[in-house]
Amino acid sequence: MGDNMKINIDELQKVTIFLLSKLKENSGEEIEISNDYYWNILDDELYNPYEKPTDLTLGQLSDDLEEIKRLINSDDAIMYDLKRLAVIFKAISIENKTAF
């Protein structure tokens, strides 16, 4: 395995804001997602390229979205909310392949 990567949070925040601004500029205030359920690979298997994942679970985008919406009126964030947000971003990128 290689060295650990360092991720600058400020840079990540700026890029995220930029990408969401471009998405909003091109798609408007809302975007539709047609898929709801997705396969989830357990964390222990996700970053192990040497073994095929065997323990898949099912996730649901609508549940993930409802869970992160609570953060609009609350500061009760947990680290798992980043995972929920990531799968929503992934679904948006898969279903909306048009360039900015």
Image (cartoon, rainbow, N blue to C red):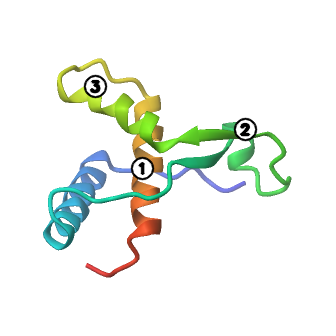
Q: CA distance from mark 3 to mark 2?
A: 28 Å
Between circles 1 and 2, the one closer to the viewer is 1
- Check disc 2 and give the amino acid type: Asp
**Side (left or right) of 83 relative to 23:** right
| Quadrant in which the C terminus appears | bottom left
10 Å crowding of disc 2: few (<14), some (14-19), many (20+): few
Query: Helix, strand, or loop for circle 1?
Result: helix
Give the answer, above or below, for where 86 lies relative to 76: below
Q: Residue 22, position in %: x, y? A: 19, 69
Q: Position of residue 25 (x, y in %)?
A: 13, 69
How crowded is the residue under tag 1: few (<14 C-alpha within 10 Å), some, or many (20+)? Answer: some
Residue 89, horizontal then vertical, whole percent: 39, 54
Which tag, 3 or 2, sits closer to the chain's start? Answer: 2
Amino acid type, mark 3: Arg
Say which label, 1 or 3, has the lower sequence index.
3
Q: Work out whether residue 29 or residue 78 is closer to the camera in this orientation and state it.
A: 29
The numbered disc on residue 88 is 1
Could you tell whether 38 is left or right of 17 in the image?
right
| Vertical arrangement, residue 23 with respect to residue 72, above or below | below
> Which of the labelled discs sits on residue 44, or is there none?
2
Q: CA distance from mark 1 to mark 2?
A: 21 Å
x and y percentages locating residue 91 in the rendered image = 46, 58
Q: Callout 3: helix, strand or loop?
A: helix
In the image, what residue occupies the spot 80% across and 49% down? 53
The residue sitting at 44% across, 59% down in the picture is 34
Q: Secondary structure at mark 2?
A: helix
Q: Quadrant location of the N terminus?
A: bottom right
Which callout, 3 or 2, points to the residue nearer the camera?
3
**Front residue of 16 and 27:** 27
**Disc 3 crowd, CA 10 A, few/some/many (<14, 14-19, 20+):** few
The mark tally for this picture is: 3
Residue 70 numbered mark, or none: 3
